[in-house]
Amino acid sequence: MTGKSFRDHEGNLLWLSPSTEAHIREKHRLPDIAGFIADTLAQPITILRSKWERDTRIYFKPSGRYYQAVIVAWTARRIKTAHLMRTIEGGDRLWNAPDATA
């Protein structure tokens, strides 16, 4: 598989394709895409299962007044996108960090 690989907090290997990285850079204007994704996957406070796409997981991590969000197609282990969100929403909680307050 081409692109960049990342590991989440449980050691799962996830892939970011060059086209998805380009999409994130152009549409969401994140300055350090690799750092944003690595940080969010390694230290999420919660993970949701998308209510629209049941095979999609959304990792959240606080970032100032916002939340970093990384969206993953779980079966394919493929990162679909990454961006900032105002709230934690979009699905059912699969996991919470032991010390999460969100």
Image: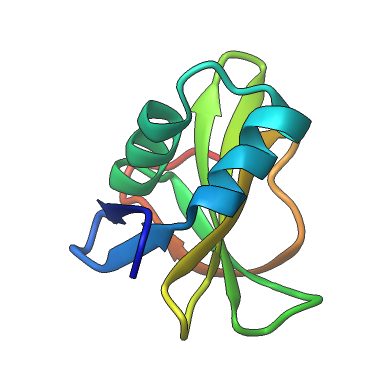
Residue 49 lies, with reference to residue 54, above or below; the image says above
Q: Is residue 92 left or right of residue 39?
A: right
96 and 41: which is toward the camera: 41
Q: Position of residue 95 (x, y in %)?
A: 43, 65
Residue 35 lies, with reference to residue 24, above or below; the image says above
- The colour scheme used to paint the residues is rainbow
Q: Is residue 33 visible?
A: yes
Could you tell me which quadrant the N terminus lies in? Answer: bottom left
Q: Position of residue 5 (x, y in %)?
A: 29, 55
Report the residue at 81% width, 76% height from top.
52
Q: How many marks?
A: 0
Q: Is residue 70 visible?
A: no
Residue furthest to the right: 52
Q: Is residue 17 left or right of residue 38?
A: right
Could you tell me which quadrant the C terminus lies in? Answer: top right
Residue furthest to the left: 11
Residue 65 lies, with reference to residue 58, above or below; the image says above
16 and 59: which is toward the camera: 16
Report the residue at 59% width, 52% height from top.
19
Residue 80 lies, with reference to residue 68, above or below; the image says below
Q: Position of residue 86 (x, y in %)?
A: 76, 31
Q: Is residue 32 left or right of residue 91?
A: left
Q: Position of residue 10 (x, y in %)?
A: 22, 63
Report the residue at 50% width, 50% height from top.
18
Report the residue at 59% width, 43% height from top.
69
